[in-house]
Image (cartoon, helix red, strand yellow):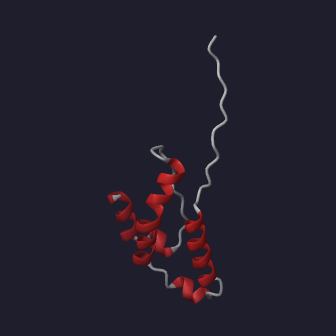
Amino acid sequence: MGFSCRIPCVKPLLNKRQCQKRLNWAKDKKDWTAAEWSKVNAAIYQEVLENFMPPAALQLYEDADFIFQQDLAPAHSAKATSTWFKDH
């Protein structure tokens, strides 16, 4: 009947360089205080989104639709951030 079976290759979500960059970032921020985290404003958040979200979304979801969820942190709910999402 022409049936065949295949086992898809398992590909890591992040390569070694990306894992190392994330680890370094986390190590740099591990001792941040609440006051330091509160300085992450909408502009900084949008910069993070611009540089990291599109490549990660492409790698994880390819061309499929996905839902990006965030909490109500001031940087997440700022008008400028809402505008950024509408533009992208």
Where residue 63 sits in the image (x, y, percent)? Answer: 45, 44
Position of 71 with respect to 42 (left or right) is: right
In front here: 26 or 18?
18
Position of 16 with respect to 67 (left or right) is: right
In front here: 15 or 27?
15
Where residue 84 sits in the image (x, y, percent)? Answer: 36, 64
Image quarter for residue 8?
A: top right
Position of 43 with respect to 32 (left or right) is: left
Q: Quadrant of the C terminus?
A: bottom left
Identity of the residue drawn at 53% across and 83% down:
38
In front here: 6 or 30?
6
Where residue 71 sits in the image (x, y, percent)? Answer: 56, 66
Against 39, residue 78 (above or below) is above
Against 46, residue 86 (above or below) is above
Q: Quadrant of the N terminus?
A: top right
Image quarter for residue 25?
A: bottom right
Identity of the residue drawn at 49% across and 80% down:
40
The count of marks equals: 0
Identity of the residue drawn at 53% across and 68% down:
72
Which residue of the protein is positioned furthest toward the left in this rendering?
87
Where residue 4 sits in the image (x, y, percent)? Answer: 65, 22
Identity of the residue drawn at 48% across and 47% down:
62
Against 49, residue 39 (above or below) is below
Which residue of the protein is positioned furthest toward the top in this rendering?
1
